[in-house]
Amino acid sequence: MVDEQAGRGSGRGPGRPREERVTRAVLDAVVALVAEQGMGAVTMDAVATRAGVSKPSMYRRWSTKQDLVIAAAESRVGPLTVPDMGDFRAELRAVLMARLEAYRQPGIDRLLAGVMAAAADPGSERGAYGEYTARVTGEMRHIVERGMARGELRPGIDVDAAVTLVAASLVFRMVAELRMPDERLVDSVVDLIGRAVGAPD
């Protein structure tokens, strides 16, 4: 069992590596359960058993199932950074290709669908989901603002709307249309968004 108890008697304290092993084992277990059986299979008991950790060690990190599945989603689809390429469309494509690669991982479609559904459950903490989406879309917001500063994009565009359109494109294809997004969709989104927000020649 991977836990904080592991290694006691060896003369060493808990240490970060063991903490990271517990976290990785739990989040991997969540993703595996979702991929194999769906979100309904994700319970604290099932995850603890699959990960080989104790439930107290899990609850010290994630007090609710919602916290746990958000952490699992963020371990696969989290914040990213795109360097300044001097070109809005190139940076937009870099973001979408990075997301496309992440979405190809087994179970990610079910996991993201479950995270969104959990946010709508009565008693769920919607703020936690909102904070997660803000982190995930933060770089896209940065890219839009950078494009505006360079004069590539029309001044005064609705940044929130642009970010939503970009973020939703691949996720809707995968979760709602039940089709895996591909590079062709990425290129279409880059072209459509680029023409919609680009500064006039």
Image (cartoon, rainbow, N blue to C red):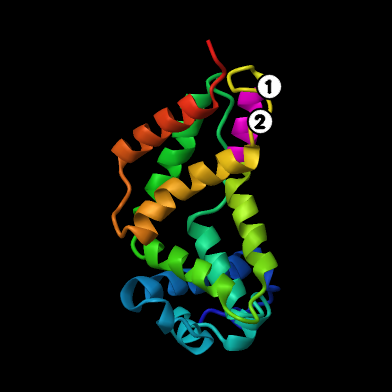
29 part of magenta stretch: no
Q: Main secondary structure of the magenta part?
A: helix
Whether residue 105 is visible here, answered yes or no, is no
Residue appearing at x 64%, y 31% in the figure: 157
Q: Secondary structure at mark 1?
A: helix
* Residue at screen point 55% across, 15% down: 200
Residue 58 - label: none
Q: Residue at x 46, y 71 (%)?
A: 114
- Percent of width and height locating residue 134: 64, 52
| Image: magenta residue range | 140-149
The residue tagged 1 is: 149
Q: Please state the horizontal and vertical placement of residue 115, each as a whole percent of the image.
A: 51, 68
Residue 107: tell me if it is visible.
yes
Residue beneath disc 2: 145
Which is nearer the eye, 93 or 80? 93
Badge 1: residue crowd in 10 Å (few <14, some 14–19, many ≥20): few
Query: How many C-alpha atoms fall within 10 Å of the one at disc 2: few (<14), some, or many (≥20)?
Result: some
| Residue 183 image offset from top left, x and y in percent | 31, 38
Residue at the farthest top position: 201
Toward the viewer: 137 or 10?
A: 137
In the shown orientation, is residue 102 left or right of residue 86? left
Type of residue at label 1? Ala
Q: Quadrant of residue 177?
A: bottom left
Q: Amino acid at mark 2?
A: Glu
Establish if 1 lies above or below 98: below
Does the CB distance between marks 2 and 1 fall below 8 Å? yes
| Rendered position, 82 above or below 130 | above
